[in-house]
Image (spheres, grey):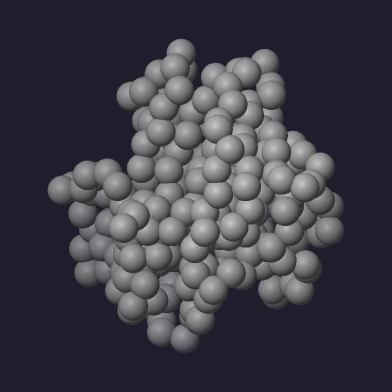
Amino acid sequence: MVSTAPMNLRLSRHADVMGRHGEGERWAEVLIEDGRNRAVWISGPPGTPPDPHIHPDFNEFWVALDGRTQWQIGQYEPVLSEWGDLIMAPAGFAHDIQPKEGVQAIRFGITHPNSNHDIKGVAPCRLIPVDEGQTNPNLVHTKLKDFISRNGTTSNWVEVAVSDNRNYATYSHELAGWSSAATSHTDENRWWVVLQGQVEWSIDGEDSVVAGPGDVVFVEAGKNYSISTTSNEPSIRITIAAPMS
């Protein structure tokens, strides 16, 4: 069941979202609805029945959080996600999602505002390796640990994970004490999922917002803001931005 909690909050805390529900329950909350995306926090304890279905005209992707979840995307072999991974179901690819480990397997789904689950998928007639012929961005399974292994932990870096007609999503790794210059985005809302460390948003005319692992921060179009890593360890976050022109 999808709940009607307040949407587009400046800060949605992992602990607050989890605290609104009982342990081991199946539930969903829409955290962001901004015209470009609907972003839904979803809990599925192991044993939740699968519901394979298709979205014929848009890509859908998820940020994997608590627990571990198995994903069957199209004819690709099933993959098992870990914290911070990103999973994509390209338009027309059936997706079957099965929570496997943890009291609650949590995922944060980024979908079209007018999405539904009416077109049901069918079991694939064969399976192919998930890495076959794929290059970043828009992988079926983007592994956070692979980005860290490739880019290291001793410098700031940004790498693109999703680039399509609705979204441009990047992983950002930033060292302790790093701060960005003030910026704004006239024509787009921008939001973030923090995966590691502690990150502070300084927003014109407002108290600063401090977010930690699993928290979601939303900044609407036209707001000036800057970002700082305030923890003693590097921070990692996923940024969901509008498509690159």
Residue 212 coordinates in the image, percent (x, y): 70, 36
**Which residue in the rendered view is the most extreme toward the bottom?**
118
- When the figure is inspected, residue 50 is found, relative to residue 133, above or below; the finding is below
Residue 18 seen in render: no
Q: Residue at x 15, y 48 (%)?
A: 133
Q: Residue at x 52, y 59 (%)?
A: 186
Q: Is residue 67 left or right of residue 156?
A: right
How many marks the image carries: the answer is: 0
Residue 204 coordinates in the image, percent (x, y): 71, 45
Residue 117 seen in render: yes
Q: Nearer the viewer, residue 209 or 116?
A: 209
Indicate the quadrant containing the N terminus: top left, top right, bottom left or bottom right.
Answer: bottom right
**Which residue in the rendered view is the most extreme toward the left?**
133
Q: Nearer the viewer, residue 81 or 56?
A: 56
State which quadrant residue 157 falls in.
top left
- When the figure is inspected, residue 108 is found, relative to residue 212, above or below; the finding is below
State which quadrant residue 200 falls in.
top right
Q: Residue at x 61, y 70 (%)?
A: 33
Q: Residue at x 37, y 36 (%)?
A: 159
Q: Is residue 181 left or right of residue 242?
A: right
- When the figure is inspected, residue 177 is found, relative to residue 48, above or below; the finding is above
Residue 43 coordinates in the image, percent (x, y): 66, 59
State which quadrant residue 52 falls in.
bottom left
Q: Is residue 165 left or right of residue 126?
A: right
Q: Nearer the viewer, residue 173 or 132?
A: 173
**Which residue in the rendered view is the most extreme toward the top?**
154
Indicate the quadrant containing the C terminus: top left, top right, bottom left or bottom right.
Answer: bottom left
